[in-house]
Image: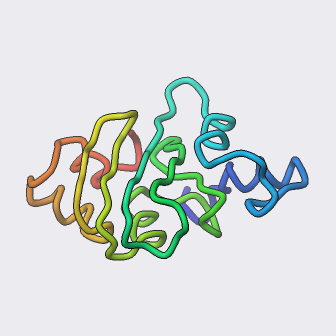
């Protein structure tokens, strides 16, 4: 199954409720929590030099894919999502509360491949199964 075939659960959750991100009363973390199940992970990204009015974003990582209602389209692998959402902005990425990367969003996998970041970063870049 390719990522194009995996529906974005966050968007589907809002659609089922007749809502969009514009009229969602909660914050990103509440939406992430609403759609996660045991065994899923939470990705937390902080940064300041991006084109959003917020300084952090929290999303679920489900079976190796990010499900983010603020990111149009299907669920995406973490590195692809980071690049699509934050381009070359400087970010700090945490997995379940533990920092795993700090640097340009679009360099996430390049840093992991060079061994500059945690082994978790490398694992997330090599497989969609986390």
Q: Tell me the quarter of the image containing the N terminus.
A: bottom right
- Residue located 71% across and 45% down the image: 26
101 relative position to 41: left or right: left
Q: Residue at x 58, y 52 (%)?
A: 67
Q: Nearer the viewer, residue 119 or 17?
A: 17
Specify the quadrant of the image occupied by residue 110.
Answer: bottom left
Q: In the rendered picture of this protein, how many numbered marks are placed on residues?
A: 0
Q: Is residue 100 above or below residue 78?
A: above
**The residue positioned farthest toward the right in the image shown:** 18
Q: Residue furthest top?
A: 38
User: Residue at (17%, 42%) from the top-left corner?
Assistant: 119
22 w.r.t. 33: above or below: below
Please determine whether, in this image, residue 94 is positioned above or below residue 56.
above
Given residues 19 and 124, the one toward you in this image is: 19
Q: Position of residue 25 (x, y in %)?
A: 78, 48
| Left/right of residue 29 with respect to residue 50 in the rendered view | right
Residue 28 x %, y %: 61, 49
Q: Position of residue 64 (x, y in %)?
A: 45, 46
Q: Residue at x 77, y 63 (%)?
A: 22
Q: Relative to residue 111, is residue 88 drawn left or right?
A: right
- Location of the C terminus (image quadrant): top left
């Amino acid at each position: 199954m390719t990522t194009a075939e995996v529906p974005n659960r966050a968007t589907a959750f809002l659609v089922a409720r007749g809502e969009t991100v514009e009229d969602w009363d909660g914050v990103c973390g509440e939406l992430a929590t609403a759609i996660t199940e045991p065994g899923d992970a939470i990705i937390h990204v902080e940064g300041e030099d991006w084109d959003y009015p917020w300084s952090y974003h929290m999303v679920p990582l489900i079976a190796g894919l990010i499900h983010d209602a603020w990111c149009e389209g299907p669920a995406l692998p973490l590195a692809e999502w980071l690049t699509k959402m934050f381009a070359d902005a400087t970010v700090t990425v945490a997995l379940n509360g533990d920092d795993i990367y700090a640097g340009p969003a679009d360099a996430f996998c390049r840093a992991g491949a060079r061994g500059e970041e945690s082994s978790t970063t490398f694992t997330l870049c090599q497989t969609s199964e986390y």
